[in-house]
Amino acid sequence: MARVKEGKGRPTNCKGCNKRMSLKKWYYRDNFYFCSKRCWEKAKDKIKEEIQKLREEKNKAKKEQAEKEAQLKAKTENTEQANVEEKKQE
């Protein structure tokens, strides 16, 4: 039988709902302890929602960065064209 490492015992509260877990009944999934399968499923759903929000924010940031680069590129092209026109006038 495997021994529990000192200081690394089973937590007393559920990761999903923070209820106190009884010694007889607990549910272990994904490196966390839950009081029931229902709490584990709810926590899993919350994590999926958080991941989806983070992905949306990341995509939004990428789009904003691409727009900034496009504006900067357009600005530099305009200045280059203005420089070429000035040289022609001289």
Image: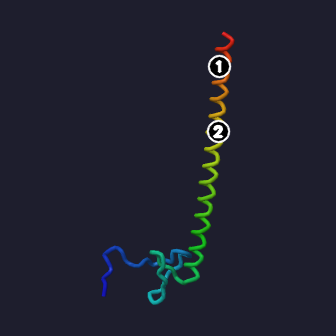
Which residue is painted at 41% across and 79% down in the image? 10
Regarding mark 2 in the picture, which secondary structure is present there?
helix
- Earlier in the chain: of badge 2 and badge 1, it is 2
Q: Position of residue 74 (x, y in %)?
A: 66, 33
Taking the image as shown, residue 87 lies to the left or right of residue 30, namely: right
Q: Position of residue 30 (x, y in %)?
A: 47, 75
Q: Amino acid at mark 2?
A: Ala
Report how far apart the C-alphas of labels 2 and 1 lie in the structure: 21 Å
Which residue is painted at 62% across and 67% down in the image? 49
Which residue is painted at 66% across and 24% down in the image? 81
65 lies above or below 84: below
Q: Mark 1 — residue? A: 84
36 lies above or below 69: below
The image quarter in which residue 68 lies: top right
Taking the image as shown, residue 79 lies to the left or right of residue 15, namely: right
Q: Looking at the image, which is closer to me, 87 or 42? A: 87
Badge 2 density bin: few <14, some 14–19, many ≥20, Cα 10 Å: few
Q: Mark 2 — residue? A: 70
Taking the image as shown, residue 6 lies to the left or right of residue 79, namely: left
